[in-house]
Amino acid sequence: MLVDDHPVVRAGISAWCAAADAPISVVAEGANVSVALHGPGRGADVVVMDLLLQNGRPAYDELQELVAQERKVVVYTMRDSQDAALTCMDLGSATYITKAEGQRHLVKAIRAAAEDIPYTPPSLAGAFGSDTRQSRPVLSVREVEVLVEWFQSESKAVVAQSLGISERTVNTYLDRVRIKYANAGRPATTKAKLVARAVQDGLIALDEL
């Protein structure tokens, strides 16, 4: 479903979705997030949301509200800002795309979000690469090892076998990592969000996934 206060933008995205290889259904659209919270919009797999809506301020509160309801949100905006991109990712958006990046990246991002797979367009990759903020949790060497192995494995059982530990121990390490991110104000409740955090913090490169 689409949240943007410009009807022409919603019409354009709808056309892109309809023209996609394996068309994407737009079940609802509107100028504010209420359309994602009520009616047909509640059932959408993915919410595509502009960051600057009718009141002109960044819609961080609205994004938080959607994420709190475990909605998968693709932020699609004119705002090409490292700070805005990283803030949206920290708040739990699936990805952040500038409108200059257009149809190809947006369609790919919608599909990735629906499948809970990370998607990093060029502008977001640049924001990650130059992130110098001090809000990164301190992970132990073993926590990083388990985390990276999990990203590159099919299951936690495979991680356990590869590292010579029990699956329960794998879960313990991953729980510790999630707690540390939550305490740093950067929650990562799903594997996709944890991957995004790890890429942001330089624990793993995109080409290693």
Image (spheres, rainbow, N blue to C red):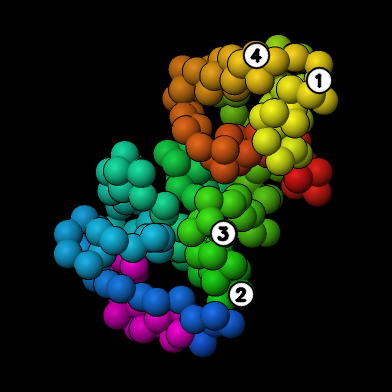
Q: Which sits earlier in the primary sequence, circle 1 or circle 2?
A: 2
Residue at image mark 1 = 163
Where is the N terminus found, in terms of image quarters? bottom left
Write the residue at 59% across / 29% down: 133
Q: Earlier in the sequence, mark 2 or mark 3?
A: 2
Callout 4, which amino acid?
Answer: Thr
How dense is the environment of label 1, judged by Cα within 10 Å: few (below 14), some, or many (20 and up)? few
Q: Given the image, on which type of amino acid does mark 2 rest?
A: Arg
Nearest to viewer (mark 3 / mark 4): 4
Q: Position of residue 116 (x, y in %)?
A: 53, 51
Magenta region, residue range: 1-18
Give the crowd class for mark 3: few <14, some 14-19, many >=20 residues within 10 Å. some
What amino acid type is highlighted by mark number 1? Leu
Q: Nearer the viewer, residue 191 or 61?
A: 191
Q: Which residue is mark 4?
A: 169
Query: How far is mark 3 from mark 1, CA to CA?
Result: 29 Å
